[in-house]
């Protein structure tokens, strides 16, 4: 270990105390991977790569500030870490460095019932936050399937989305203001105002920056009353095309639900028994919720009628309620599949406008289908388009061939997005794995990002190797 | 190692490949904030050891003792995996190889003289209670357990008062050693346990019903002694189960008032699936006015006292109970009621300075029956 690193460790121990600076091997191994799927191939082979140099656990923003100053003085990479549930290697210490685990900072500072906002530390787990808000009669309305294992900081870092995004938006829509630390150790607070016209929105520069521009330590978030009225249904459509048209109509004719998911034929077949739906056609699960009974019921009635008008077969509420019961179940499949040698599964979520949605879906299905098993659902509907969420499984007894097949799937999906002007990511972010396609995605925008990085983090200490920044 | 862990293959593989879905609930990981402490983190380290990619050393062993065995992770696992079984098996190997933490290794010697974790002749505490009932030959045995006898002998008296009002013919366990052996099992002293199990099985044989105020004893006697089986024992119950079935036979004198908050002990709840009996008793004595913690029953959070955690990682154990007491205060609780001596000990110790009142529900029941 170089003198520079040792000196940094000594300074960190001085600030945080020995217990909050860990360099034992079991700890380091536990931070070498997140949920990036090919990382499990290494686990399967007992290969341990990308160990950080040490892990520290600050308890307040002042300590984070001091850590950043030490890292800057010693030019040591810093990787902010929440739940480590990202799937693109966003927290993998590809250049080594110090992990700043923020989970000792998970306080709910305030819940303001007048403004309907809360101020919360970044290290809190989603489920912890949601339960605490529910006790006060509120919800964040943010329900990613990773809610049990992902933190607010991770959500903000990657622009995450929850299952009820059609009503509550993505995390960038509920994040009102941020508190964090910049590269010189200074502590910033953006202003919590309803809207402003004071130059570019700095919150939106930092949200989604994946820890490359600074460390977000807390946020002020918009919250909503817990819904008292809920109405869920299942509908069946003949094919993806009609289902997509149904989503478009709902989103553009003031019939937006909270929950809207269209499963393609393969995904429908896969989920049919669990969701109490026919195994043929395309299942659409829809849910309306709110605290105003009349408004919610009216919207639901109009929405359901509209779906019937466009040849949707009403399956009643059973599929909707079954979906609600199993809403987080999908993540449990990972263990079953990955524990079988030769298997590798992964998901790719992309964002596309309605005009190109069917074309992109077909193109990716065709390309990936030649390599492995693939299915998709359309979730996170917006006025102008949808997220397509592909799940795929590749198989090969040879680990390197399996890794290559996995890469080929990604390459084909990403190139299809770029060809059709779709976005290569809807809510999982970039990490290190998607970085190779980001320059093409952003075009000149990536140069702006690089300039911003050089200004805000000239020594490239913040999470190097992510968002296509600091790879060299 | 691989051979010894064969029985836990499914658990190790499933947990290692899981995206840590139970982690937010793990009481230990909440305190340490470390990825290594999560159930997935520990299982991944075990997988690497099992596969020969990582050396099994004292650092690994120390990590594996970071678990209170609360089973809360099972609540959030759709595969219903219980990680503690794997940890206990690894701990047994750690003890054999001398890799377990020093306090764990020394425990074997401390236990030897009086065969309990407290280094004290606990049988003398029970002698007078037991002798008073020895003339009544009965197929019912009250097994108080070592923790209740050591910390809360008055609760045992309360228990006998209740049973006497029910006119139950019973005996109190009156032998030189009164521990069920769970502490040995939890921390990996399996070899010492074998001899004790043989001795205890012999002493328990001949009874038809065993009642205990300690859920850990009930769980352990059921899981380790009923199969292949102590001669003639048909039933082992926690005292709350027995009393809730016989509430009609009690003559209540006083309603217990104040804000009572009930804590579900892990061994009573998730291990034995006993949730309602303590609530039935509390309903009867408070006229249905007791409170629940935010998370209760299968989701109830742990006190930090199980699985040998207070021995191997006392600071983590205390921090867990402190967290729960914060919630107790936020609820405006005045009495923390439970049904497990270890939970009560953890809360009483952690809450001592803040004057937190902790009571076993049997003592509250005795009070309600007019105990002076």
Image (cartoon, rainbow, N blue to C red):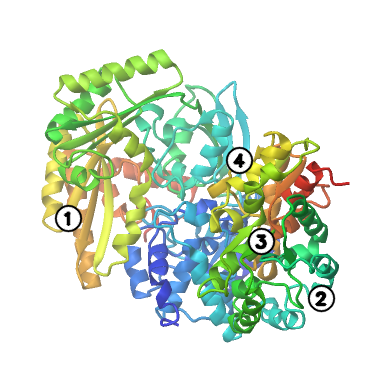
Q: Which mark is residue B294?
A: 4
Residue placed under numbered mark 3 in the picture? B211
Determine if marks 1 and 2 fall on one subunit.
Answer: no
Q: Is B290 located above or below residue A253 in the figure?
A: below
Density class for disc 2 (Cα within 10 Å; few <14, some 14-19, many ≥20) is some
Q: Which chain is disc 2 placed on?
A: B
Q: Which mark is residue A1?
A: none
Q: Gap between marks 3 and 1, in whole Å?
A: 56 Å
Marks 3 and 4: in contact by CB < 8 Å? no
Density class for disc 3 (Cα within 10 Å; few <14, some 14-19, many ≥20) is many
Q: Gap between marks 4 and 2, in whole Å?
A: 39 Å
Q: What element does badge 3 sit on?
A: strand
Residue A44 on image: x %, y %: 34, 71
Residue placed under numbered mark 1 in the picture? A373
Residue placed under numbered mark 2 in the picture? B121
Determine if marks 1 and 4 fall on one subunit.
Answer: no
Q: Is residue B26 left or right of residue A376?
A: right
Marks 3 and 2: in contact by CB < 8 Å? no
Query: Which label's residue is closer to the chain start, 2 or 3?
Result: 2
Q: Which residue is painted at 78% across and 57% down in the image?
A: B160
Residue B3 on image: x %, y %: 41, 83
Q: Gap between marks 4 and 3, in whole Å?
A: 30 Å
């Amino acid at each position: 270990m170089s003198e520079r690193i040792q000196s940094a460790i000594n300074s960190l121990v001085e600030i945080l105390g020995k217990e909050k600076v860990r360099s034992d091997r079991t700890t380091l191994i536990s931070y070498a991977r997140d949920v990036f799927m090919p990382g499990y191939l290494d686990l399967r082979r007992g290969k341990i790569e990308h160990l950080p140099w040490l892990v520290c656990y600050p308890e307040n923003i002042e300590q984070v500030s001091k850590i950043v100053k030490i890292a800057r003085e010693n030019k040591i990479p810093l990787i902010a870490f929440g739940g480590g549930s990202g799937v693109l290697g966003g927290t993998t210490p590809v250049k080594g460095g110090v992990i700043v685990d923020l989970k000792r900072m998970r306080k709910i500072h305030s819940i303001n019932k007048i403004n309907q906002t809360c101020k919360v530390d970044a290290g809190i787990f989603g489920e912890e936050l949601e339960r605490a808000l529910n006790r006060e009669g509120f919800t964040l309305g943010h329900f990613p399937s990773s809610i049990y294992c992902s933190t607010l900081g991770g959500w903000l870092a990657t622009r995450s989305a929850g299952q009820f995004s059609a009503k509550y938006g993505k995390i960038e829509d509920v994040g009102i203001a941020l508190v964090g630390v910049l590269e010189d150790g200074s502590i910033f607070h953006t202003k919590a105002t309803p809207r402003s016209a004071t130059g570019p929105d700095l919150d939106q520069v930092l949200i989604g920056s994946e820890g490359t521009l600074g460390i977000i330590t807390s946020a002020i978030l918009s919250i909503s009353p817990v819904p008292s009225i809920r109405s869920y249904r299942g509908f069946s459509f003949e094919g993806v095309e009609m289902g997509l048209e149904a989503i478009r109509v709902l989103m553009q004719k003031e019939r937006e639900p909270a929950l809207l998911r269209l499963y393609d034929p393969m995904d429908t077949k896969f989920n049919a028994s669990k969701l109490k739906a026919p195994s043929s056609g395309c299942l659409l699960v829809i849910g309306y919720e709110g605290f105003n009974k009349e408004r919610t019921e009216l919207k639901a009635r109009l929405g359901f009628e509209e779906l019937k008008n466009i040849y949707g077969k009403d399956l009643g509420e059973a599929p909707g309620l079954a979906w609600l019961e199993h809403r987080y179940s999908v993540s449990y499949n990972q263990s079953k599949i990955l524990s079988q040698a030769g298997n590798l599964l992964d998901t790719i979520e992309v964002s596309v406008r309605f005009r190109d949605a069917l074309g992109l879906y077909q193109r990716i299905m065709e390309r990936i289908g030649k390599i492995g098993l693939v299915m998709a659902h359309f979730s996170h509907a917006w006025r102008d388009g949808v997220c397509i969420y592909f799940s795929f499984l590749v198989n090969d007894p040879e680990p390197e061939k399996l890794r290559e097949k996995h890469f080929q799937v990604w390459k084909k999906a990403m190139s299809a997005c770029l060809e059709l002007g779709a976005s290569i990511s809807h809510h999982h972010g970039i990490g290190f794995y998607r970085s190779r396609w980001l320059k093409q995605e952003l075009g000149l925008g990536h140069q702006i990002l690089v300039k911003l990085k050089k200004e805000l983090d000239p020594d490239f200490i913040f999470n190097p190797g992510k968002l296509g920044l600091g790879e060299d | 190692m691989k051979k010894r862990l064969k029985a836990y293959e499914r658990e190790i593989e499933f947990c290692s490949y899981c995206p840590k879905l139970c982690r937010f609930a793990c009481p230990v990981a909440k305190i340490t904030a470390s990825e290594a402490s999560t159930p997935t983190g520990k299982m991944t380290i075990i997988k690497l050891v099992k596969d020969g990619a990582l050396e099994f050393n004292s650092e690994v062993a120390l990590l594996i003792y970071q678990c209170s065995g609360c089973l809360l992770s099972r609540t959030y696992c759709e595969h219903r995996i219980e990680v503690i079984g794997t940890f206990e098996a690894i701990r047994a190997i750690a003890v054999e190889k001398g890799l377990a933490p020093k306090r764990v290794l020394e425990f074997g010697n401390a236990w030897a003289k009086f065969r309990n974790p407290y280094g004290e002749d606990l049988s003398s505490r029970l002698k007078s209670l037991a002798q008073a009932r020895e003339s009544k030959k009965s197929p019912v045995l009250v097994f108080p357990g070592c923790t209740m006898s050591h910390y809360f002998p008055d609760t045992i008296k309360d228990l006998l008062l209740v049973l006497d009002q029910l006119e139950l013919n019973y005996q109190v366990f009156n032998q030189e050693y009164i521990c069920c052996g769970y502490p040995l099992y939890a921390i990996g002293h399996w070899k010492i346990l074998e001899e004790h199990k043989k001795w205890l099985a012999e002493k328990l044989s001949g009874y038809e019903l065993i009642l205990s105020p300690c859920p850990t004893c009930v769980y352990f006697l059921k899981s380790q002694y009923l199969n292949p089986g102590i001669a003639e024992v048909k039933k082992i119950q926690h005292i709350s189960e027995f009393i809730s079935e016989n509430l009609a036979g009690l003559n209540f004198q006083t309603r217990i008032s104040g804000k009572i908050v009930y804590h579900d002990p892990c061994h009573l709840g998730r291990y034995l699936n006993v949730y309602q009996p303590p609530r039935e008793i509390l309903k009867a004595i408070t006229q249905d006015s007791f409170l629940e913690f935010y998370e209760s029953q299968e989701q109830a959070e742990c006190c930090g006292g199980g699985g040998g955690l207070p021995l191997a990682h006392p600071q983590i154990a205390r921090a867990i109970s402190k967290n729960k007491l914060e919630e107790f205060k936020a609820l405006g609780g005045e009495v923390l009621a439970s049904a497990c001596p270890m939970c009560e000990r953890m809360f009483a110790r952690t809450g001592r300075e803040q004057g937190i009142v902790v009571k076993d529900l049997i003592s509250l029941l005795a009070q309600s029956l007019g105990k002076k």
